[in-house]
Image: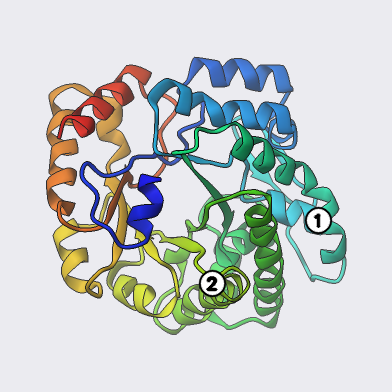
Amino acid sequence: MKLMRVLNGEAVWPPPVWLMRQAGRYLPEYRATRAQAGNFLKLCLNPELAAEVTFQPIRRYGFDAAILFSDILILPMALGQTLTFAEGEGPQMPPLKSIDGLNPQAAPGIYAPVMETVRRLRAGLPAETALIGFCGAPLTVACYMLDGKGGGFPRTTALAAESSPLLDDVINLLITASIAYLQAQIDAGANCVMLFDTWAAITQGETFDRYVIAPHRQITTALKAANPGIKIIGFPKQAGTRLPDYVRESGVDAISLGQEVDPAAAIAACPPGTVFQGNLDPNVLREGGPTLARETRRVLDAFRGTPHIFNLGHGITPDVNPDHVADMMKIIQNA
């Protein structure tokens, strides 16, 4: 598997490719399958249909990896917090006041359909296609649990600034639950896993150490102790100047870079041998044409000779023309 070779530190040319949210609304076949499921949450919890939408971009583009189709909020839902997806408004949860009503022991039975999806994926994917499991990192998941919805997360930001015992309780619960959730994905057939900390930037300084680096380190330490050789990709979005600290201290094997990061600066700042993932701007994929060709080659050239997984700096937007993805793949394959 090309992707696993890179995660082991090899600079492969051309690099392996997968794209964040590669199974999504930009694909007509995804929209048809989602309509069949009834709603987004039902789609995530239907192993047959969740596997189908994960397969779709692999069939269409031949990406080097498939990432499990699911959602970062399946885990808090499994812990006992009510989750709904309102059309046009995103996920919503009743803001958490304490962890007393949550039940970690019941979670594996509730997220069992996700593990069945993983098993179906590993059985049905080409042998050369890596399967990536994932979960939301504790801080990012806590943001939704405590604020109840997206939109800046003022409550969680304030709790982090004051080192709130409630936030500590939620983070600690999520560390333990995330280890179990990712371990279940590995047991079901995931070749590697990824931690998405989309809202890492709400922390600064000591709070970044406390709520981003330390939880990631606890998760990676536990998973590697139980699974020698497992590879873990971290994505602390907009970590800024703390990116090198995160690479050195979190225990991840690869760092995913947002589109705001300059590749040369990241390579210079991070330890030698760091494995990178990213970081084409999703807006460029939407634009297509000469801009897409130029920027795809720029990213390729920036990381050439470095262990690198070609990806976006964040997820594909629903308005991307699928033909633009095919154009990008041709550029990479002919590099």
Residue depicted at 36% across the width and 66% down the height: 239
Quadrant of residue 297 within the rendered picture: top left
Horizontally, residue 155 falls left or right of residue 292, namely: right
Q: Residue furthest front?
A: 127
Does residue 317 lie above or below 274 as drawn?
above
Q: Earlier in the sequence, mark 1 or mark 2?
A: 1
How crowded is the residue under tag 2: few (<14 C-alpha within 10 Å), some, or many (20+)? many
Residue 87 appears in the rendering = no
Q: Residue 167: give x, y in percent of width and height.
A: 65, 75
In the rendered view, tell whether residue 196 sits above or below residue 167: above
Question: Mark 2 is on which residue type?
Answer: Thr
The residue singled out by tag 1 in the image is 108
Image quadrant in which you'd find residue 319? top left
Whole-percent x, y for residue 160 in the image: 55, 76
**Residue type (three-letter) at the residue carrying disc 1:** Pro
Q: Could you say which disc has been placed on residue 220 in the image? A: 2
Image quadrant where residue 48 sits: top right
> How far apart, in angstroms, are the residues tagged by discs 1 and 2?
20 Å
| Quadrant (top left/top right/bottom left/bottom right) for the C terminus | top left
Residue at figure coordinates x 13%, y 25% from the top left: 290
Q: How packed is label 1: few (under 14 Cα within 10 Å), some, or many (20 or more)?
A: some
Secondary structure, mark 2, is helix
Could you tell me if residue 236 is visible in this image?
yes
Pick the front one: 31 or 122: 122
Apparent side of residue 242 relative to residue 51 in the rendered image (left or right):
left
State yes or no: discs 1 and 2 in contact (Cβ < 8 Å): no
The residue at 74%/22% (across/down) is 38
Residue 114 vertical placement versus 245 (above, below): above
